[in-house]
Image (spheres, rainbow, N blue to C red):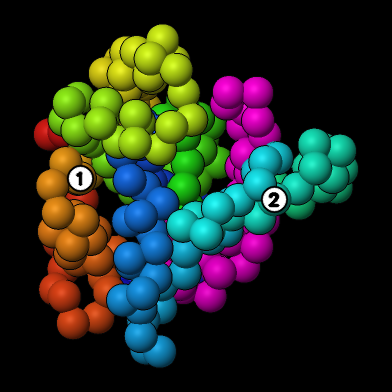
Amino acid sequence: MNSRISTDGHGLFYLMGPSGSGKDSLLRALRERLGPDDRVVVAHRYITRDADANEASVALSADEFRRRKALGCMALDWRSHGLHYGIGVEIEQWLAKGLTVIVNGSREYLAEAVARYPRLCAVHVRVKPEVLAARLRLRGRESEEGIARRLARAGAAFEVPAGCRVVEIDNSGVLEVAVGVFARLVGVLGVGDVLCVGAGEM
């Protein structure tokens, strides 16, 4: 792994994808693969709702989230579906130590993230529409109307800033296959290495 000391996003992987694409499952499975010599850290995400056991999130009240943001504790933050999401400034200390840092981000916030961390690598998790629909119905959070909106949003184009590196991972099938690709991408020891492809090669 490259140990260049930087906080410009070198070593930062920005995971994104539609709700139901399996981002939290990918991150959980990756964390389970990490050994003591892997210089890879999955950042916790701060969110104004209860976190479930499958995600690396810390629940905050809306007031506490706003307080921490005002104090400069958030490196990245955005709103989605009426909730606040944030990534703490601790990731900059980790990047400065030469660690590889992975954050669970938002496609709609990619441009702002790249503006702050111009050398990040964006990882887009995609899922076949029929698989995504089945997963959304299985978790039982939305009505059919809500699921239809999420499916439409999942298929919509999103802005990729000029020069941003993007890798696409298909998580329509067996989770272990997608995790293996993800682990190689971020350089987990013992699983090889791959390079980020350009945004034009998505």
Q: Give the residue at x 40% y 38%.
A: 139
Q: Is residue 119 visible?
A: no
Number of disc labels: 2
Q: Give the residue at x 19% y 33%.
A: 131
Q: Mark 2 — residue?
A: 59
Circle on res. 171 = 1
Q: Give the residue at x 47% y 64%.
A: 42
Q: Is residue 68 left or right of residue 170?
A: right
Residue 89 among those drawn in magenta? yes
* Kind of residue at badge 1: Asn
The magenta region covers: 75-102
At label 2, counting other C-alpha atoms closer than 10 Å, the crowd grade (few under 14, some 14-19, many 20 or more) is some
Q: Is residue 164 left or right of residue 4?
A: left
Q: Are marks 2 and 1 in contact (CB under 8 Å)?
A: no
Classify 15 as above or below 154.
Answer: below
* Kind of residue at badge 2: Ala
Classify 184 as above or below 167.
Answer: below
User: Which secondary structure, mark 1?
Assistant: loop
Residue 168 among those drawn in magenta? no
At label 1, counting other C-alpha atoms closer than 10 Å, the crowd grade (few under 14, some 14-19, many 20 or more) is many
Quadrant of the rendering where the N terminus is positioned:
bottom left
